Image (spheres, grey):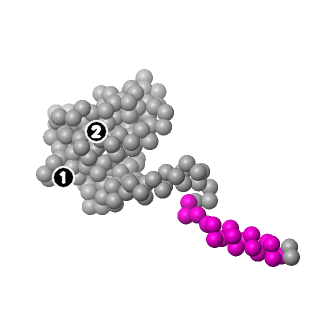
Amino acid sequence: MRTGVLLLAAALLTACGSDAEPDASPAERQGGEAQSMTGLASTYTTLDLDKCQLVDEETEEGTSAEWRCAGFGGVPLIVEEGDGRFDVDAGIRNDRFETIGEFNSLGDNVEWRLRDGKPFAVIFRYLDATPEAKGRTVLAVEKVGTAAAPGCRVAQVAGDVPDANQVARDLADSNAADFTCGTSEMAVAGNAT
């Protein structure tokens, strides 16, 4: 009888299996379900300028450079550097140099926000390079641009804002689609300029 109870219990557990990872919390399981219902998801790529194509470089009067990097889903990243600061555009290069005020470098990863599998925004991290920064970082949310409508900066979130990554995702998801470059105002959370 004991063996029959154990087999019945095992069969019930198998029938009630979940698609969520075994270690996922209830909140993570719910988040996964919400993502699939709304069509929103994230994927990640690395950003390594040594693996990007150097498109332009100026060393005569100050330094500046432009790279074209592989992105995701055929959407490239265009990275510009000038005066010790970086700008990242997704899709195509726009005519704005959008960065934080301090000298900076870029983090190694880019989060691509996807709607129904298509990228509509990227999130990347600035590392404040000034001596007094003490590890300050800023997450930037950039709208993916097209030839008809170049993208631009949608939001900047200080890295020390509670749950900064999720705040950046929420700003991308709620603002990027309707954001009008040159007219809409960039959202700022915390010390992020």
7 inside magenta stretch? yes
158 inside magenta stretch? no
The x and y percentages for residue 140 are 34, 39
User: Which residue shows up at 39% across the image and 42% down it?
Assistant: 170
Q: Is residue 177 visible?
A: yes
Residue 74: quadrant of the picture? bottom left
Q: Is residue 80 visible?
A: no
User: Which residue shows up at 45% across the image and 31% down it?
Assistant: 161
Residue 154, label in figure: 2
Q: CA distance from mark 2 to mark 1?
A: 15 Å
The x and y percentages for residue 91 are 23, 52
Return the residue nearer the eye: 55 or 168.
168
User: Which residue shows up at 55% across the image and 64% down it?
Assistant: 19
Residue 69: quadrant of the picture? bottom left
Per the image, the residue denoted by label 1 is: 146
In the image, taking residue 16 as reference, residue 173 lies left or right, namely left
Single out the residue that lies furthest toward the top. 132
Residue 58: quadrant of the picture? top left
| Secondary structure category for the residue under label 2 | strand
Question: Please, what is the three-letter code of the amino acid marked with disc 2?
Answer: Val
In the image, taking residue 191 as reference, residue 4 lies left or right, namely right
Quadrant of the image containing the C terminus? top left
Question: Please, what is the three-letter code of the amino acid marked with disc 1?
Answer: Thr
In terms of secondary structure, what is the magenta stretch mainly?
A: helix
Return the residue nearer the eye: 157 or 16.
16
Crowd tier of the residue under label 1, counting other residues whose Cα lies within 10 Å: few below 14, some 14–19, many 20 or above: some
Quadrant of the image containing the N terminus? bottom right
- Point out the stretch of residues depicted in magenta: 3-20
Disc nearer the start of the sequence (2/1): 1
